[in-house]
Image (tube, rainbow, N blue to C red):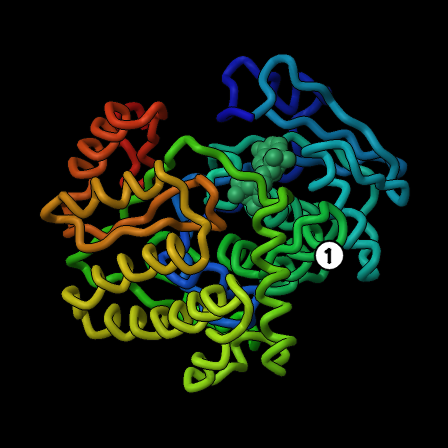
Amino acid sequence: MKSPQTDAPRFESLFGQPPKVQVRAPGRVNLIGEHTDYNGGFVLPMAIPQHTEVHLSPREGRTVRAFSANLGAQGQVNEYELGQEKRGRGWLDYVQGVTHVLRAEGHTPGGFDLWLSSDVPVGSGLSSSAALEVALLRGLREAFGLSLDDVRIALLGQKVECDFVGAPVGVMDQMASSLADTGAALFLDTRSLKYERVPLPTQVEPIVINSGVTHSHSGGDYRVRRAECERAAKLLGVEQLRDLPDAELPRALALPEPLGRRVRHVLTENARVLQTVRALREGDLAALGPLLYASHASQRDDYEVSVPEIDLLVELGRAEPDVLGARLTGGGFGGSVVMLARTGTGASAASRIATQYAEKSHHQATVLVPEPSSGR
Ligand code: ADP
Ligand code: MG
């Protein structure tokens, strides 16, 4: 699936009148705290400027008609009846999932016409799925006066993926899309859902580069990692790995391969989130870079969710004098990298990295942050 196609029809030409509601929700980049959310741990995401836009109008009856501009001129208006949602219709499952979980929770929107469009790259670790869910839930809240706060919207979005789409994700993506903004990181305890906004020090700015290697969350690898964590927790006698004290790590390392290394990633990653929050608050730039690189090494070696193209991007970042640190962001198996650079240097460093990446790999990288200024 591509970026929004300029040749794709707009809401009005599809449905015969302008939309009643127009809302949006951003994609997200996780600064640090990967694969910790489904273990009850800490995460530190930020919103990215790219977002999903929803145009929507209520209609008589119980029919939903939905169109995604990302499918271009060949895209079709898909239809289903509320109450008859059936999994297995590709991207429409995310829309059907939203109305399905709303009803399960006692909310009753009527039929509607929906047009959506996104410049969040799909399957690139930047959470186009959460952006879609949160944007649609915001649109339905406004159109039908549903009583939903932003945390509720995030939890419903997570339910869409877990209960309907069949991707057992944690809550980070939807919390970030619903609550984070681009200027500050959202320090979130995924167990209590307590969160706090932590601004980046003025001396640093984020870089986000999409490797062009896509993943699929509903695919097997993410599911396998999650199952490994659940198995390790069970063997270690804790409800979630969040509950395992650091002193118990030697016991975890005695578990059958690869469970010990999976546990080590989760425990050390949780600690790195806390250390990163402290470094951001104190403006301790020297501490930030090593934390990001250590997180990457842990994802690559202990959690085994990186791929050579992502490792290459991280190493290209390391060669840049003004890049403080770099790591794989998102679920992995492809996707994107996040870096922190000295403010004012991010755009040129990112463009050099993308050029070298194209020469050294068979893929094309896309710089998403800092936003390319031309044509915007
Ligand atoms: P990501 O990391 O981007 O969230 P996922 O695999 O979780 O990757 O979700 C990607 C899926 O979400 C797509 O395959 C598609 O089904 C759906 N999706 C996301 N954005 C859109 C969009 N703008 N139009 C249609 N479907 C979308
Ligand atoms: Mg997703």
Q: What residue type is labelled 1?
A: Leu
Q: Position of residue 181 (x, y in %)?
A: 41, 55
Q: Visible in this render: residue 46? A: no
Provide the residue designation for mark 1: 146
User: Image quadrant for the N terminus?
Assistant: top right
Looking at mark 1, is its residue's CB closer than 8 Å to ligand 1? no
Of residues 150 and 222, the one nearer the viewer is 222
Q: Visible in this render: residue 7? A: yes
User: Image quadrant for the C terminus?
Assistant: top left
- Residue at the image point whose x is 51% and y is 24% from the top: 2
Of residues 283 and 222, the one nearer the viewer is 222
Q: In which quarter of the image is ligand 1?
A: top right
Q: Position of residue 160 (x, y in %)?
A: 71, 51
Looking at the rendered structure, the secondary structure element under dot 1 is loop
Of residues 171 and 102, the one nearer the viewer is 171
- Residue at the image point whose x is 59% and y is 80% from the top: 236
- Residue at the image point whose x is 47% and y is 37% from the top: 120
- Residue at the image point whose x is 46% and y is 74% from the top: 253
Q: Where is residue 308 in the image (x, y as percent from the top left)?
A: 36, 39
Q: What is the tally of numbered marks visible in this picture?
A: 1
Of residues 120 and 242, the one nearer the viewer is 242
